[in-house]
Image (cartoon, rainbow, N blue to C red):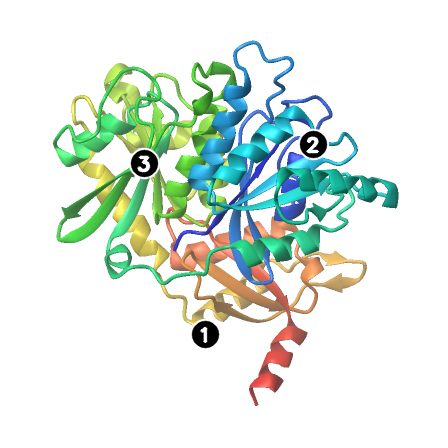
Amino acid sequence: MARPIVAIVGRPNVGKSTLFNRMIGQRKAIVDPLPGLTRDRLYGVADWRGREFTVVDTAGLDLDTAQDSSRAAIEAQTRIAIDQADVILLLLDVRQGLTPIDRDIGQLLRKSRRSVIVVANKADSPTERHLAHEVLELGFEEPSLISAQHGLGVGELLDRVLEALPVPEAAAASEEAADRLAIMGRPNVGKSSLLNALLGDERALVSPTPGTTRDPIDTELMFDGVPVVLVDTAGIRRKSSSRDRLERYSLLRGIHAMERSDVVLLVIEAPTGVLAQDQHVAGYALEAGKGLVIVVNKIDLVEPATRKPAYWRMALAGDFKFASFAPVVTVSAKTKEGIGSIMPAALEVVGQRRIKMPPNELNRVLREAFLEHPPPSFKGRRLKVTYATQSSDESPTVVLFVNDTGLLHFSYRRYLEKKVRERFGLSGNPLKLVLRSEESRRSRARAAK
């Protein structure tokens, strides 16, 4: 089931990236006082009071200095948020008061039927909070007063977000029955051509012009009796190379498609190799708990010696070190070489997502791992796992009940993940280790009696 999407919109330098970091609990976006520094829309998964939702951080546009756009640019950003997000956070700088750009965004949002929460940021003192009354002129409910930098009021804001999110609905039977594969990648790497090669027809418009495919297109097919849905998405494009400002915000469409998928087919092109955007998309997919298959396209344009999957597995090892478990297939959508390897690889990853890890076997694997290589001690204390179990999440997740959740070093986490993979496989899928205190387990046991 897709997570709901919360988009943060606003003019440059009002604190969107800082709020984004607060909401997802980690520093992923670069924060700098220079307007427009957030180069690409970033997204992350927030978990508040047990409810997960996707948060999207938008790059600001300084209309006073932009040379290639006008107010139409901010309208494009806002309209994309209206089109794709379930809840929109309109972020304002309470110290600067309302600006013409703020009013323009507010007018667009009032005409929409989306849930909008106005957030007055940088309200660090009583004086600044008093200035927030001006925000009411936008015509929305009382604003949430926060200081994203210091975390003041963010918890209350998240409570409002939860109230505004749509009620979770059970997935339709047809959606549950079909395995969903999202075809993602930069513009012009051959995603639509790849889709056509898989389908054997021209259902998706194919054009050499980057960005021709603007909206996700769902296509159903049967593969060896298995129902599959292929989602062809708009390419991920760097801001600096966009001719059309809409391209700057097309990532949100791709994220929406990714959230609805089981496995991401990340398409890169052999002649160019891996770029930063490719790594970002892979990171997005794994953070969202999706399976991943790396598809190297256009091998007809490289030397025969560099067309085999084995070559590319070695070549990509450094660029995708964080996704070393992802299978790699090499294809040419143009000549159809290797096309037959994509679906088996993708469905194998789907199958690996559904592997069951029996508690007895899982705990045995972890005990042996601890005996083979004990965890390092920290201030005289050492990590102890009293029990482990697989959670019911869609992606492979192991819950570890431990003596102290702060004692698991990231290097030892990787070691434990490796040991679990050696036993259970999980090819192409991220493995999430969730730490909980042993006391919480005991409390649940007492409550159940």
Name the one closer to the observer, 373 or 170: 170
Residue drawn at (59%, 22%), measured in percent from left and top?
61
Residue 25, given in percent of the width and then of the height, sits at 65, 48
Give the class, few, some or many, for how many residues have Cα within 10 Å of label 2's Cα (few <14, many ≥20): many
Residue drawn at (22%, 38%), measured in percent from left and top?
341
Between the residue at mark 1 and the residue at mark 2, the CA separation in whole angstroms equals 52 Å
Between the residue at mark 1 and the residue at mark 3, the CA separation in whole angstroms equals 43 Å
Q: In which quarter of the image is the N terminus?
A: bottom left
Q: Which amino acid does label 1 sit on?
A: Asn
Residue 335, given in percent of the width and then of the height, sits at 16, 22
Please determine whether, in this image, residue 223 is positioned above or below residue 399. above
Residue drawn at (79%, 42%), measured in percent from left and top?
123
Residue 172, given in percent of the width and then of the height, sits at 29, 59
| Left or right position of 163 against 236 | right
Return the disc, 2 or 3, that comes first in the chain's sequence: 2
**Circle 3 SS class:** loop
Q: Nearer the viewer, mark 2 or mark 3?
A: 2
Please determine whether, in this image, residue 165 is positioned above or below residue 41. below
Would residue 95 be visible to someone looking at this image? yes
Residue drawn at (72%, 63%), measured in percent from left and top?
382
Please determine whether, in this image, residue 412 is positioned above or below residue 75. below
Would residue 317 be visible to someone looking at this image? no
Return the disc, 1 or 3, that comes first in the chain's sequence: 3
Q: Name the residue under label 2.
A: 14
Which disc is residue 216 wearing? Answer: 3
